[in-house]
């Protein structure tokens, strides 16, 4: 069985996902067989795995860091928030139903057996498993039945490395306070700590570093600087809300409204990297920019609820005005469904049973169903090759399908295009990562693009992360903790 090491944090967004990805690439580049694992994740950004399941996007990226194919065992429990305070429950890659806030605690504890089964299968395939926690072990109100942090660490006998984010302030209190509030048996699982997101001279924190060691008894394993390479990586839990002050001469604006249950927004990352494009993520309370050359409606985990939110913001009025001016409009997955004439959810897949009128820009109607389609695809659109994946619950029908957007390699067609060729929609995620298709799309906007190989750029960023961690982390000490297990 592989040696394991679990990266937990003093809070959410302290950089756990990125550090796991960087450590995975570091160990892989050293010649070790390494795989990532996250017992329980909550995210609407997901990826399709080689075994036909789905896992959190961060774990898919971590698999790439390991030079491995993403597999459903890498994230056996995935919660995807929907409307009405419910989450779709994914277990070992497949839909298992929904969980509400009232039954969440009771429902998760029985999942530990399946979490452990996935972990054991991964452990049999490699030398090291790098495990990512969720949130913080200091959330002691959630400790009973926990499978995401110390509940898993103690069940699997995996030592823990605790990460504190110095950029947000209070890192000494966060680390020392974590030990103060958690159960002593949980605290005994923690073997060391890392300081993350440091700006400036690390020597300025030497006294604070020693203070944490003295007050916790944990070993400091390094101070990690602010890692600029992170900008090149897909983000799982945050989107850029601020629009750059000056888009620069000749750049074309592509606007995407930030819906309450936006999903798989990393679809847009390759566009964000294009020098001729300014990607504007439009937050609530702001109109869609009048000078946008293209509008993209993103994926959604609660399409009908997000459509209502879109109307509540007045974005439907903005979209209608853009449509009359001839702006290019594209919908992906849930966004594609919104562009149709209607969406029906008779079985309450996304919440209460309901039906909604769509934006009416594509001549299709969508019925949401309980069966989720999960598959990787290849095809062609706008005369260019593309690859991507399908991940949706729903079937669209109507005359609009007679003008499909994508011709798939397996003989199927996908999506729809309006008669003028200015409104298009597709169920295929990830299409902008295909350079040829991206170039063909941007050519429609009068922009030269598609030169960058997005996958190669992500891979290079992972190598840069690994190099930074080699310089700033006590890797020998980290491996000694992993190899020693809980008795180390």
Image (tube, grey):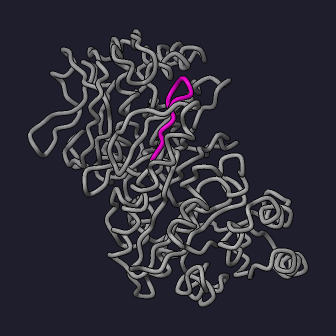
- Number of labels in the image equals 0
Residue 185 versus residue 224: which sits nearer the camera?
185
Question: Residue at point 55% right, 81% down?
Answer: 485
Residue 242 versus residue 348: which sits nearer the camera?
348
Q: Is residue 372 visible?
A: yes
Above or below residue 239? Residue 477 is below
Residue 121 is left or right of residue 161, and the answer is left
Question: Residue at point 19% right, 28% down?
Answer: 404
- Please report the bounds of the magenta region as a residue range: 78-86
Q: Give the x, y percent position of residue 200.
A: 81, 73
Q: Give the x, y percent position of residue 95.
A: 34, 39
Above or below residue 48? Residue 303 is above
Q: Give the x, y percent position of residue 279.
A: 54, 42
As for residue 237 lying within the magenta part, the answer is no
- The image quarter containing residue 414 is top left
- The image quarter containing residue 467 is bottom right
Question: Residue at point 36% right, 78% down?
Answer: 126
The quadrant the N terminus occupies is: bottom left
Q: Give the x, y percent position of residue 197.
A: 72, 66
Above or below residue 43? Residue 72 is below
Q: Is residue 257 visible?
A: no
Question: Residue at point 54% right, 77% down?
Answer: 466
Residue 143 is left or right of residue 450, and the answer is right
Residue 351 is left or right of residue 147, and the answer is left
Residue 223 versus residue 381: which sits nearer the camera?
223
Which residue occupies the extreme left position in the image? 411
The quadrant the C terminus occupies is: bottom right
Residue 334 versus residue 139: which sits nearer the camera?
139
């Amino acid at each position: 069985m592989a040696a394991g090491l679990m990266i937990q944090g003093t809070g959410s967004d302290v950089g756990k996902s990125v550090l796991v990805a960087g450590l995975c690439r570091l160990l892989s580049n050293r010649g070790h067989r390494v795989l990532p694992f996250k017992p329980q994740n909550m995210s609407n950004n997901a990826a399709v795995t080689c075994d036909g399941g789905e896992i959190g996007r961060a774990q898919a990226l971590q698999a790439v860091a390991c030079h491995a194919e993403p597999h459903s065992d890498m994230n056996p429990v995935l919660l995807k928030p929907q409307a009405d305070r419910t989450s779709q429950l994914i277990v070992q890659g497949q839909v298992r139903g929904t969980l509400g806030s009232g039954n969440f605690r009771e429902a998760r504890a029985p999942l530990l057996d399946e979490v452990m089964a996935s972990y054991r299968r991964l452990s049999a395939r490699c030398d090291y498993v790098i495990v990512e926690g969720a949130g913080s072990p200091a959330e002691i109100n959630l400790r009973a039945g926990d499978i995401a942090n110390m509940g898993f660490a103690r069940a699997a006998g995996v030592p823990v490395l605790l990460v504190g984010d110095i950029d947000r302030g209070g890192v000494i209190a966060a680390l020392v306070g974590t030990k103060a509030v958690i159960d002593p048996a949980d605290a005994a699982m923690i073997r060391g700590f890392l300081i993350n997101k440091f700006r400036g001279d690390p020597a300025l924190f030497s006294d604070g570093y020693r203070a944490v060691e003295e007050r916790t008894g944990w070993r400091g394993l390094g101070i990690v600087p602010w890692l600029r390479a992170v900008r090149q990586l897909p983000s799982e839990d945050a989107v850029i809300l601020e629009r750059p002050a000056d888009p620069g001469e000749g750049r074309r604006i592509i606007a995407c409204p930030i819906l309450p249950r936006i999903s798989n927004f990393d679809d847009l990352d390759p566009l964000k990297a294009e020098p001729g494009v300014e990607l504007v993520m439009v937050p609530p309370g702001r109109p869609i920019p009048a000078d946008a050359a293209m509008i993209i409606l993103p994926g959604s985990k609660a399409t009908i609820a997000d459509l209502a939110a879109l109307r509540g913001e007045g974005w439907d009025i903005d979209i209608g005005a853009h449509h009359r001016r001839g702006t290019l409009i594209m919908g992906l997955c849930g966004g594609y469904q919104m562009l149709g004439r209607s969406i029906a959810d008779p079985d309450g897949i996304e919440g209460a049973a309901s039906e909604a009128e769509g934006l009416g820009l594509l001549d299709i109607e969508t019925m949401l169903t309980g069966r989720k389609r999960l598959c990787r695809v290849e095809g062609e659109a706008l005369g260019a090759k593309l690859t991507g994946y399908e991940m949706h619950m729903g079937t669209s029908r109507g005359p609009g399908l007679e003008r499909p957007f994508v011709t798939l390699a397996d003989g199927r067609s996908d999506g729809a295009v309006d008669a003028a060729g200015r409104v298009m929609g597709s169920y295929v995620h990830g299409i902008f990562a295909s350079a040829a298709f991206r170039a063909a799309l941007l050519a429609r906007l009068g922009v030269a693009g598609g030169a960058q190989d997005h996958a190669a750029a992500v891979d290079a960023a992972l190598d840069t992360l690994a190099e930074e961690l080699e310089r700033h982390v006590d890797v020998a000490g980290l491996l000694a903790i992993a190899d020693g297990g809980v008795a180390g």
